Image (cartoon, coloured by chain):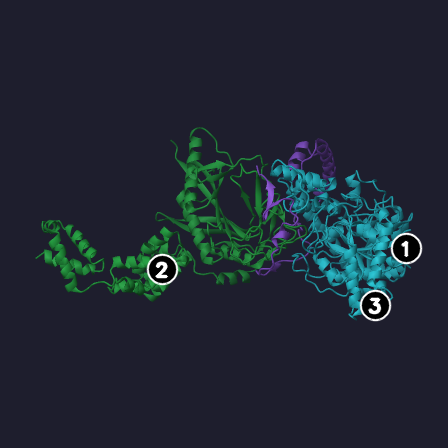
Amino acid sequence: MAQYEAVIGLEVHVELKTDTKIFCHSSTEFGADPNQHVCPVCLGLPGVLPVVNKKVVEYAIKAGLALNCRIAPFSKFDRKNYYYPDLPKNYQISQYDLPIAEHGCLEINVHGAGKRVGITRLHMEEDAGKLVHQGTISSTPFSLVDYNRTGVPLIEIVSEPDMRSADEAVAYLEKLKAIIQYTGVSDCKMQEGSLRCDANISVRPAGQAELGTKTEIKNMNSFKALHKAVNYEIARQIKLLESGGKVVQETRTWDEARGETLSMRSKEEAHDYRYFPDPDLPPLVIDRAWVEAIKAGLPELPDARRQRLVTAYGLPEYDAMVLTSSRELADYYEECVQIYNNPKLVSNWVMGELARMMNAGGQDIQEVRISPAQLARLLQLLDEGTISGRIARTVLEEMYNTGKDAGKVIEEQGLVQISDTGLIEKVVDEVIAANPKSVEDYRAGKEKAIAFLVGQVMKSTRGKANPGLVNELLKGKLNK
Amino acid sequence: MQLHYLTAHQLHDMLVSKQISAEELTRAVFERIEQVEDKIRAYITLTREQALELARQVDRARLAGEALPPLAGIPVAVKDNICTKRVRTTCASKMLYNYIPPYDATVMKHLNQARTVMAGKTNMDEFAMGSSCENSAFFTTCNPWDTTRVPGGSSGGSAAAVAAGEAILGLGSDTGGSIRQPASFCGVVGMKPTYGAVSRYGLVAYASSLDQIGPLTRDVTDCAMLLNVICGHDPLDSTSAPFAVPDYTSFLTGDIKGVKIGVPREYLGEGIDPAVREVIQKAIETYAGLGAVVEETTLPHTEYALPAYYLIAPAEASSNLARYDGVRYGYRAAEAEDLVDMFMRTRSEGFGSEVKRRIMLGTYALSAGYYDAYYNQALKVRTLIKADFDRAFEEFDLLLGPTAPVTAFKRGEKVDDPLQMYMVDICTLAINLAGIPAISIPAGMVNKLPVGLQLIGRPFGEGDILRAAYAFEQNTDHHRMLPE
Amino acid sequence: MISIKDVEHVALLARLSLTGDEKQVYGKQLSDILENVRKLQDLNTEGVPPTAHVLDLQNVFREDRAGEHMPVDQVLGNAPDRQGNFFKVPKII
């Protein structure tokens, strides 16, 4: 059986975080009632004209620079003509042959192997509105249109077909998201649609130079969906070729419920967008000074920050990579270390307990109620021996739920660690007396038995006994 | 002399000296409308009550001793592709037969600030595509000089209204000659300003890189006064030029000694009616007699203006008119099976045949495989045409020629032959492609029909054009002639 | 010469449904017009840049400042069909 190689490129749409739309003064705020954030311009009324929001251009340049792109000295807007009811003018103002940024790249790391993925181009365009159906698009008797999102600024980032697996595709999208978030030009929230991704996928026999026929996969609303859809599509195409079939160039949609990509074939004519320069919008001339000024305002980006975390704090590469996956997480980490200088311990807790709680609650670091200072204080208390690691986890949980200070939680619940030898000794004696079997096992050489006895001591002190002390006392008594 | 046939500057003096009131003036114009509108049919929508109310407001201000802006209380006919808040704006199309804009075009804001009084919205070729007003979805406007003939187009309604005394001033739009050619046919003054001099915000787009709003008036002074009101930079129009608007009336000195006027030989060559050519020759003599230096020159790419125009304008139109789909406003075909069916039927039933023809042509010119051969080649030719003018203006202050190759033709005469109809604009198209200003002023009569003289200027050279136009007007009587 | 098939393709792109007669007439007229514009191709335009804008304007921007929205009844004021505050259209497919 022939070995196949998958070739994957991604087209990513990112909504820019401006206050107003790309060509008019309507608000971009998410979640308004239908058709509330609309003005004559974004509604495409007869006679209206677009005027470019300067911040959109600045943000696009910023994103381009962060993705190592060359910023075009001369760029323009074009009209992409096609009919759809969510598109008020029945053309979308976009950029065709002179995008604002080109020839970029970013570095990904999959299973320890680094790789550079090329970025073909980055261009600006306007978003479309939203169609609401009752039931599915094919069963609904009519559709309803809301133009609130119409004209929200987007950048489209097109990668080179440099990825070879679903893991690489996900790594690329994660990295792209991190970089864009670092620049502050977008929230990149996949759930809210401010980050959207389409994939171009083809397969070819290993060693073959020319590309196979590609399909375009749409409607992947999470990293998980991207991973599953890419894998599904690769397998589908290989199976098709193996059985003597041919891949049809087409657009397919990812059906999350069925776990399949489905053809979106329609009676629609072959796409002919009839691009031409928008006569309503004069061109953009972007001089060095402007680019340099924007470059100067770029924050430290994920790769540089990761490096710094390794050298400045002595963190392992892995920790640094995880902590820099979002700007907010890295900020949180560093703020915490500033207050309590124990980088590895802080890293363990942020990546461990805190991340676990965030995952469970589906929250981002920005939504966590524990401030970096509060976490630092908790870890200090742990380090000082005021509480045990186990108690610290309990306290953290309470802090996570209530936002209370560690000290307050410990006081309220009486969780201060017991380091009074006399007190612990008394409990140790009780436990030894009550568990002769385990004592015997231990003495017979079953070292593990001591763990059970420690556990019993902790249990009867409700976890407050200093675990080190318990161990020491137990061993002392058992080894007598 | 009846009020409705006076000029705005004469009427302003009468308003200031309290010989008349604005309300009287408005009533006089509406009486005239009642008298002749059956024959002329210049208006799609009349706004009589609103006009009278505005006129009374002007009168109150006047009685309170407020200084009146020069055009306060003057009735204006507005082409029906200029958006007027709360007043139906149809573009003479079934597609927008019921459309009521929720906003005013920038020029309307200027007119309102100047306290002019809108009399109504005028007939035109549908979406400004045409040269005779016969492409209106509603009815055809007649030429006041001969009602069996067309008033020209596409701003034929505004031109006819001004010529027939149904308004004192008119606003039109000019994409390939749509102000100047009806001005020529109706014997009035019509100017297409420099592209970017007047805001296009609120002008329903036909071909965005060519469209420009401009005045239709009874004389050159009124034209200058109306330009003063409508010109100026508009932040809502990205193609609006940031320039200092001069007082255009300051150019009306009557002195054109030493002004160098070029006559492009292409504008007096083949295809120009000999009688029209004769009128233009006489005008040249008049200018020479006034001390201007008139010499022949050449615009070598003139013959390419028409083909370039008929690719660029329809291409832009095909995109500009895509928004008329029955979803958000305007006409919607009944009982469509599904969305594509609704789109196709709405557009087929809502647009007239010339609009559909241009949409088809433009769609074809932009479609895959043809873009470079047609559209992009036309844009390159546009560069050459513009360069012709640049070269001519290194030598000359103004260029002169006929506005149209013929006088007003009979209704129905050209309606079945699009190419013949397009030829009527051969003297005006190139000016839009180059984005420069030009005026048409009455220069004489042929068989009792007016002939327009076209003066073309440098970008933002409206003042120079007006100076020469005014000098001509002061030394001739053509602008005083009135239709019966 | 434009074929009926070309006419049909262009009409679909432009969302126009034409009758058989219209297809014939438009096919003929478009062919005539295109015949006339073909003379543009005789011109040597090598090295001539296209003019998309006659004015030498560039970088025309607005600031990122919010303005007024339209009242929703005005937004829907001209709508041929609506449901609540949505525009209503026939089923997509």
Q: The chain coloured purple carries which letter? A: C
Q: Work out whether disc 1 and disc 2 sit on a shared chain.
A: no
Whole-Å distance between the Cαs marked 2 and 3? 77 Å
The residue singled out by tag 2 in the image is: A402
Between discs 1 and 3, the one toward the N terminus: 3
The residue singled out by tag 3 in the image is: B16
Q: Residues within 10 Å of mark 1 (few under 14, many from 20)?
A: some
* The color chain A is rendered in: green
- Measured as percent of width and height from the top left, residue B217 is found at 82, 57
Q: Which mark is residue B481?
A: 1
Query: Is residue B57 visible in this depiction of the protein?
Result: yes
Whole-Å distance between the Cαs marked 1 and 3? 26 Å
- Measured as percent of width and height from the top left, residue A24 is found at 60, 56
- The amino acid marked with disc number 3 is Val
- Horizontal side of B258 relative to A163 (left or right) equals right
Residue furthest to the top in view is A244
Residue furthest to the left in view is A480
* The color chain B is rendered in: cyan
- The amino acid marked with disc number 1 is Met
